[in-house]
Image (spheres, rainbow, N blue to C red):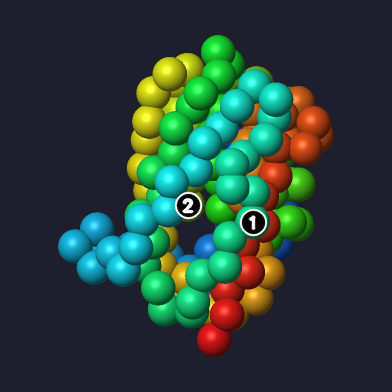
Amino acid sequence: MTRIAILFLMLAAAGGAWAHDDFGRHGDPKKTTRTIRIGMADSMRYSPAELTIKRGETVRFVVSNRGKLKHEMVIGTMKELKAHAEMMKKHPGMEHEEAHMVGVTPGKTGALVWQFTKAGKFHFGCLEPGHFEAGMIGRITVVE
């Protein structure tokens, strides 16, 4: 069984940890309502680290890696991010690509488009091993 198959089985066993349709979904790039630029640095911080977004908004996140290490932005609940961070520790270097995440190599810029369908508190984090634990976490407040 491949690592990816094992990962998906582990996620399913974790109670649907990546069921992102509970608060959002991949957004249509043609229907973007605004663009938010986020910087990532080897200080293990995002800039800005706190965002407020209106429910229903489709946001294009333009994410720039200003460091010398690979970083990523993964959107989810704190529970989802913690579970995924634990898996990344067990499978370092594992490549993964989902609509709610973007990985960016040093000196490069990436983007993801997300539509927030539910109000509440959500997070984004870098799940490269050790980065999340070092505080590379941001908060998204989705308001009505």
Residue that lies at the very extreme toward the front in this rendered image: 48
Q: Nearer the viewer, residue 27 or 16?
A: 27
Q: Quadrant of the C terminus?
A: bottom right
Residue appearing at x 58%, y 73% in the figure = 142
Disc 1 residue type?
A: Glu
Q: Using the image, tell me which numbered label, if any, was put on residue 108.
A: none
Q: Residues within 10 Å of mark 1 (few under 14, many from 20)?
A: few
Q: Nearer the viewer, residue 14 or 19?
A: 19
Left of 62 or right of it: where is 91?
A: right
Q: Position of residue 11 (x, y in %)?
A: 64, 50
- Return the residue at label 1: 50
Foreground disc of the pair 2, 1? 1
Disc 2 residue type?
A: His
The kind of secondary structure element at disc 2 is loop
- Return the residue at label 2: 100
Residue that lies at the very extreme toward the bottom in this rendered image: 144
Q: Position of residue 16 (x, y in %)?
A: 63, 61
Q: Position of residue 21 (x, y in %)?
A: 49, 69
Q: Residues within 10 Å of mark 2 (few under 14, many from 20)?
A: many
Q: Position of residue 61 (x, y in %)?
A: 41, 50
Residue appearing at x 64%, y 43% in the figure = 125
Q: Is residue 4 visible?
A: no
